[in-house]
Image (tube, helix red, strand yellow):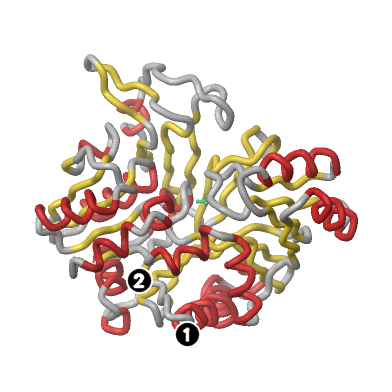
Amino acid sequence: MRILILGSGAREHAIALALAREAAGHDLLVAPGNAGIAAVARTVPVDPSDAPAVASLALDEAVDLVVVGPEAPLIAGVADAVRERGIPVFGPDRAAARLEGSKAFAKRIMADAGVPTGAATDVLTAADLDAALDAGGAPYVVKADGLAAGKGVLVTEDRDAARAHALSWLERGPVLVERFLGGREVSLFFVSDGERAVALSPAQDYKRIGDGDTGGNTGGMGAFSPLPWLDDAFGGEAAFVDHVRTAIAEPVLLRLAAEGCPFLGLLYCGLVVEGRDVRVIEFNARFGDPETQVVLPRLTTPLSELLVAAATGTLDTVRAPEVSTDGAVGVVLASEGYPGDPVLGRPIEGIDDAEALDGVHVVHAATERAGGELLAAGGRVLTGAFDLDVH
Ligand code: GLY
């Protein structure tokens, strides 16, 4: 198959690596890709959020499938534009991608579908904000309603910090003040064809910047999969996954389909688990980063089967995904200054040495080549992933 992947991060590199190792031998194109992706796929300098340009590229290259990596193209309607040309797309239309693009929309869908989540108040003014902060009390959870590149959420005991964060986002749009949910976080990916939901293995990611899980929030600094602690709470991963599918994923998919916006793509359930209680913190409409870097290497059945079946509404015809019993851990290497203003252009060395170690591979997030050197080109630069024998 000829497959076009949109995006330029470690998630897209991990997707490309998973597709490249399939026996079928796909022809992979990535727009725009990065220096690491260029080693396994043809990279094309097309803006992944430019819907007409992506649709033209997909047509000109006669691709069999488009896989949308990041959220921005989904919110920009790129999947709609490609689907309108009759090309299968793994990624929801703009209307269904609102599940990630608007936290207020996601809360409304969850309320209508009877899905457990934290109570939240929509805030549009400073007066609403003060009332919501005082009604909920500490710890304060403040979230920007729209896309915020992992920077829209603040959880704090400090009311002044919560208020300042909310006011800075209120200048750009609505804000949610949410009840704090305690527990352990789990990211669970469901591949969906609009009706059915097929789960991959759960992962846990760590979003704080500092060692020891301290400091400010980021898009994610590391992840691991599977989660042996689920055995104590649920008697195993399969029971947990079944619970989330029936209590959360399927009701949400049903609700979206009933509203005329079926979700074809990756439903990322960001969950908090306390005992046997599972609640939704957030949904995303695409694979998570860095969770993808530890979930996909464990998949032993072809990823392309799932992506095509989801894009064509035929998930009932494919075998259930199988995963290795080995675990995986991923650690993000970021530029100095991230998640604020990262220092760009620093040379990167040592990747070959790292990959010479047993069970280690390095996935590129923001890298570029200049004058024969590999340079850091963004905040999150690489993910180092390690296989782990967890049994
Ligand atoms: N790791 C969090 C995210 O992908 O949104």
Circle 1 SS class: helix
**Residue sitting at 36 percent across and 59 percent down?**
77
Along the line of sight, the residue nearer the viewer: 232 or 286:
286
Counting residues from the start of the chain, the first of labels 1 and 2 encountered is 1
Along the line of sight, the residue nearer the viewer: 327 or 57:
57
User: Which percent across, then down, holds residue 5?
Assistant: 26, 52
Q: Which mark is residue 90?
A: none
User: Looking at numbered disc 2 in the image, what kind of residue is underneath it?
Assistant: Pro
Number of labels in the image equals 2
Q: Is residue 228 visible?
A: no
**Residue sitting at 47 percent across and 34 percent down?**
380
Circle 2 SS class: loop
**Crowd rating for badge 1 (residues with CA inside 10 Å; few <14, some 14–19, many 20+):** few
**Residue sitting at 65 percent across and 33 percent down?**
211
User: Looking at numbered disc 1 in the image, what kind of residue is underneath it?
Assistant: Ala
Give the quadrant of the N terminus: bottom left
Q: Image quadrant of residue 304?
A: bottom left
Q: Which mark is residue 258?
A: 1
Q: Is residue 134 visible?
A: yes
Is the residue 129 above or below the residue 259 in the image? above
User: Which percent across, then down, holds residue 183?
Assistant: 73, 60
User: Which percent across, then down, holds residue 37?
Assistant: 26, 39
Is the residue 316 above or below the residue 109 in the image? below
In this rendering, would 108 be left or right of 134?
left
Q: Which mark is residue 321?
A: 2
Is the residue 361 above or below the residue 284 in the image? above
Q: Image quadrant of residue 311?
A: bottom left
